[in-house]
């Protein structure tokens, strides 16, 4: 292999994935934005104007004149969309907090486990992730139904007298999100806790700190990077979640992922769904950039 | 800085039958499952003493220190600190502080808040904390680093922050777990003396765990040599070196030649041992039975190598042949092969820059020593 | 020296119960005689039989496996390249944008990714079907592969590569003979991750697929919407069994290799 060959190889290593992501990840967003400025048409594709090179420059300029922000104005005027955005953020936020509250003790317990057990425990956290997400959400229907297993259990123990209505409420969505995203919260927190030098806790205790206060003054602040990463990994996708609100939330629940899906698949209004997606992306851009920076920083530290 | 000589020379509370120990380990046993880390150990440490626990890894020295700090509970026995049994007291209520081997500095806090951490736990007023932290920073000469994070400090600076943090609460006892282990040789030697000065200045009791015998010999008033969860000998560095009580201690501390033989005569403060190469005559009060086996330990620097035969060639002397020579600069080490085939190690100070006709390889020499040069081992 | 307190044991045990209980129930009720998913009416394997007679589900499963195999393989190549660029080339034009594009799909809501890819395919006039789903899955999963391989590369001892270069291997040969064998386990787990993600995906596939390319999750989704049937439980149980067998085999292989390695080291130590 010549020196030139090696140089070409190292160029390719960068260029191929780069070009792929530009074409399949970046360009589509530009297209989404462009179509969000179009109007619906009964045609194939179902929007206009459609840019065609055959129209020549004057034709394209003509087409650009037809673009408008009407769809975005429409989004602000219809309370349905605004409510869907707000309720998505609220549901994702509450679910993220619930996930954190449940995941932290699990991650902490795992990090305290005997060293030889830890790989097994870690594997057990990742394993459900390898079974279908759809299936795991579906399993909850049978549990949460009015005549479902949870109600059967609670009724038979006498804790309740009539079935709890959980399915098709926001509570079902919270449960679904917590359940599906739990590993994404456990893993970063666990890895932060596991890396921590146990002598730091001993040092805190040695200096007069009782165990619980040592946890809040030393352990928790040092696991904060993992907590933030976990919250990002749960919150951002949960805002745009479709499957969970669709299967567990029923028809009453309002989440933007579901709205977008309906707009696109049932109403076949492509420009409005593109506008919905654009606004969702704008809402999420701050947390996404924050997440990217955190990843990049972690990568720097790894070096 | 004042010389420590006068204070140190007169400091020997362990020799005074009226003085009471400050820390007492009484029949301490610590088991981890089947493994016995500390085995029925009894040990006294006195107020203001600089005490070293010395031993190889796994000898139980760290476990002992951690029991004193409160991180481990003894399986049986009691630990008395300043007249109080502390076995049931959790680490955060004990008047002792520890300097950790890894330093265990809180990475999310500045140097200042690390040092002030313990004081904040006690609810000390803010102004007082600031003042104490300032004093501590001055003590360890890190005033200009107060607002740095531990990651922005060198190894030596981190060590000093850890020291300042553990001293800030003015503990009754400071525990140091391999305090200088992570430093390079030169820094380690400087810091040894700094620690000694500090201990004298503050008048505290220091208990240090180390596997480095030189470090223990330099710093400590007394050393406990440990092995397999037990204390083998507790004595001053000089006693440990010059009068080891056992083969283990003699071997563990410094270099030693052990000459085996049978007791030929004993009495009047003298013991005679007949060995293969030497007939040893040494001072000693013990009176072992005639004919029993005995081991005589002698350090390399106390063996004399010469071309000429000593005056009394029958006692404490043997012929031999130079087997190996190692020139170390300040001294030269000769390995001398004795007639029985045993090789002894001797070292000779190079008092002059050049020696005419130095002793060379394969030369026939005499090895000899004085009656007070060695010691008969007890086991 | 850490103590596993009762609180810790309890939180881990409850956490795992929460994670596994729904899956266990799903498996149990796949053997239920009754059509009702919540009432136990005796043991039966009839749903498995009817599952295998359900041609629609079987076809969808076949499409899904083909998509997953193909997209995971290509995504692994692209993702490994992306990881190499990120770790080894710290300075090139547009690196910030590049790392942004690698991390963003990890958290990007699937509806956005799916919609945007669909609009791309429509805009360039690419007929929707098997290939569009595959391309979409490559794009999504290559970023996961990149992150997995990247973390391995970060802990990689560069001096091994330098030794190869020093001994006269060209950078390219060094990569294939030294680097790749060392990072191979991470590359493999990246592949497995990509495969499962592709197998699992509903939303992106729904947007980007066309006639004749219905994947298993899409099929399951449409049936679930119509009502819960134990047939789906049976299909899920088979998928879970497949994954479990894979994981168990993988862990046995790694454990055996680990034991062998320790034995070798021990022998080398005793011999030396």
Image (cartoon, rainbow, N blue to C red):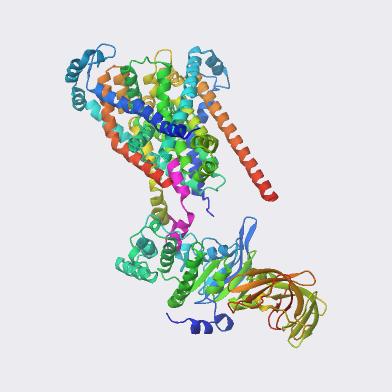
Position in image of residue A99 (x %, y %): 40, 39
A298 displayed left or right of B293:
left
Is residue B243 placed above or below A22 in the rendered structure? below
Question: What's the magenta region?
Answer: A187-212
Q: Which residue: 49% across, 85% down?
A: B6
Task: Looking at this view, name the residue that lies furthest to the top.
Answer: A43
Quick one: C51 or B212, which is closer to the camera? B212
Seen from the viewer's position, the closer of residues A152 and B233 is B233
Query: Is A43 displayed left or right of A137 in the figure?
Result: left
Residue A251 visible: no
Report if residue B284 lies within the magenta region: no
Residue B217 percent coordinates (x, y): 56, 73
Tell me if B97 is positioned left or right of B365 in this view. Answer: left
Magenta segment: does it hold A197? yes
Principal SS element in the magenta part? Answer: helix
From this viewpoint, which residue is outermost toward the right? B291
């Amino acid at each position: 292999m010549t020196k030139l060959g090696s140089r070409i190889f190292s160029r390719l290593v960068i260029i191929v994935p780069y070009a792929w992501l530009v074409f399949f990840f970046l360009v589509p967003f530009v297209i989404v934005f462009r179509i969000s400025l179009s109007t619906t048409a009964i045609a194939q594709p179902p929007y206009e104007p459609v840019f065609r090179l055959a129209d020549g420059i004057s034709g394209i300029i003509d087409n650009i004149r037809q673009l408008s922000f009407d769809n975005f104005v429409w989004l602000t005027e219809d309370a349905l969309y605004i409510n869907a955005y707000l309720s998505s953020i609220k549901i994702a936020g509450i679910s993220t907090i619930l996930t954190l509250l449940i995941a932290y003790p699990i991650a902490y317990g795992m990090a305290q486990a005997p060293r030889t057990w830890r790989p097994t425990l870690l594997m057990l956290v990742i394993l459900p992730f390898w079974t279908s997400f759809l299936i795991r959400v579906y399993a909850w229907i049978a549990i949460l139904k009015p005549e479902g297993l949870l109600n059967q259990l609670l009724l038979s123990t006498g804790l309740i007298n009539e079935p709890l209505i959980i399915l098709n409420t926001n509570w079902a969505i919270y449960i679904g999100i917590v359940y599906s995203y739990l590993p994404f919260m456990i893993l970063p927190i666990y890895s932060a806790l596991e890396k921590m030098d146990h002598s730091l806790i001993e040092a805190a205790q040695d200096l007069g700190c009782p165990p619980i206060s040592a946890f809040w003054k030393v352990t928790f602040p040092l696991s904060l990077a993992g907590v933030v990463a976990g919250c990002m990994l749960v919150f951002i996708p949960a805002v745009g979640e479709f499957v969970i609100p669709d299967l567990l939330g029923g028809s009453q629940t309002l989440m933007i992922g579901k709205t977008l899906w309906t707009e696109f698949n049932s109403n076949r209004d492509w420009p409005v769904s593109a506008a919905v997606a654009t606004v969702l992306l704008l809402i999420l851009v701050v947390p996404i950039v924050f997440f990217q920076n955190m990843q990049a920083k972690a990568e720097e530290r790894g070096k | 800085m004042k010389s420590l000589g006068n204070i140190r020379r007169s400091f020997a509370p362990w020799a005074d039958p009226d003085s009471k120990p400050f820390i007492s380990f009484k029949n301490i046993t610590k088991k981890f499952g089947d493994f016995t880390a500390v085995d029925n150990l009894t040990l006294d440490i006195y107020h203001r003493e600089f005490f070293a626990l010395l031993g190889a890894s796994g000898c139980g020295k760290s476990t002992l220190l951690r029991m004193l700090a409160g991180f481990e509970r003894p399986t049986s026995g009691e630990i008395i600190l300043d007249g109080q049994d502390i076995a049931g007291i959790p680490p955060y209520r004990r008047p002792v502080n520890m300097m950790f081997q890894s330093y265990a500095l809180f990475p999310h806090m500045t140097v200042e808040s690390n040092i002030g951490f313990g004081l904040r736990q006690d609810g000390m007023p803010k102004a007082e904390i600031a003042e104490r932290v300032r004093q501590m920073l001055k003590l360890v000469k890190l005033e200009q680093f107060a607002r740095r994070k531990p990651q922005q400090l060198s190894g030596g600076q981190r060590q000093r922050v850890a020291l300042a943090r553990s001293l800030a609460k003015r503990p009754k006892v400071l525990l140091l777990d391999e305090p200088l282990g992570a430093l390079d040789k030169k820094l380690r030697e400087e810091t040894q003396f700094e620690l000694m000065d500090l201990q004298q200045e503050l008048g505290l009791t220091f208990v240090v765990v180390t596997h480095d015998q030189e470090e223990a010999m330099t710093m400590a008033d007394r050393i406990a040599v440990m092995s397999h969860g037990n204390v083998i000998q507790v004595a001053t560095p000089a006693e440990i070196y010059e009068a080891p009580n056992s083969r283990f201690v003699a071997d563990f501390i410094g270099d030693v030649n052990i000459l085996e033989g049978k007791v030929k005569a004993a009495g009047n403060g003298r013991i005679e041992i007949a060995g293969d190469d030497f007939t040893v005559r040494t001072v000693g009060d013990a009176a072992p039975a005639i004919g029993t086996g005995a081991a005589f330990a002698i350090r390399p620097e106390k063996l004399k190598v010469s071309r000429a035969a000593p005056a009394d060639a029958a006692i404490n002397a043997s012929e031999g042949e130079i087997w190996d020579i190692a020139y170390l600069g300040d001294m030269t080490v000769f390995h001398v092969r004795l007639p029985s085939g045993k090789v002894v190690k001797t070292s000779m100070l190079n008092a002059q820059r050049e020696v005419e006709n130095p002793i060379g390889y394969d030369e026939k020499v005499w090895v000899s020593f004085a009656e007070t040069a060695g010691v008969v081992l007890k086991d | 020296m850490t103590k596993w307190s009762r609180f810790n044991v309890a939180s881990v045990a409850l956490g795992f119960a929460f994670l596994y209980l729904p899956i266990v129930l799903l498996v149990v009720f796949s053997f239920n005689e009754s059509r009702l998913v919540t009432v136990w009416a005796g043991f039966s394997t009839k749903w498995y039989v009817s599952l295998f007679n359900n041609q629609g589900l079987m076809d969808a499963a076949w499409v899904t496996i083909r998509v997953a195999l193909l997209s995971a393989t290509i995504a692994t190549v692209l993702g490994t390249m992306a990881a190499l660029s990120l770790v080894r080339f710290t300075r090139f034009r547009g690196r910030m944008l590049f790392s942004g594009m690698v991390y963003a799909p990890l958290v990007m809501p699937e509806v956005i990714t799916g919609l945007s890819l669909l609009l791309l395919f429509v805009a360039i006039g690419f007929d929707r079907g098997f290939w569009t789903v595959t391309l979409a899955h490559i794009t999504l999963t290559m970023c996961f592969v990149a992150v997995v391989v990247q973390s391995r590369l970060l802990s990689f001892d560069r001096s091994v590569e330098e030794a190869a270069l020093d001994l006269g291997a060209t950078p390219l040969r060094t990569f294939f003979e030294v680097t790749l064998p060392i990072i191979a386990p991470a590359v493999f787990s990246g592949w497995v991750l990509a495969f499962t993600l592709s197998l699992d995906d509903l939303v992106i596939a729904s947007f980007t697929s066309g006639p004749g390319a219905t994947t298993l999750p899409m099929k399951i989704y449409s049936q679930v919407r119509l009502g819960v049937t134990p047939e789906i439980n049976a299909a899920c149980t088979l998928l879970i069994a497949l994954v479990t067998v894979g994981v168990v085999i993988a862990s046995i292989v790694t454990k055996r290799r680990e034991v062998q390695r320790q034995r070798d080291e021990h022998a080398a130590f005793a011999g030396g």
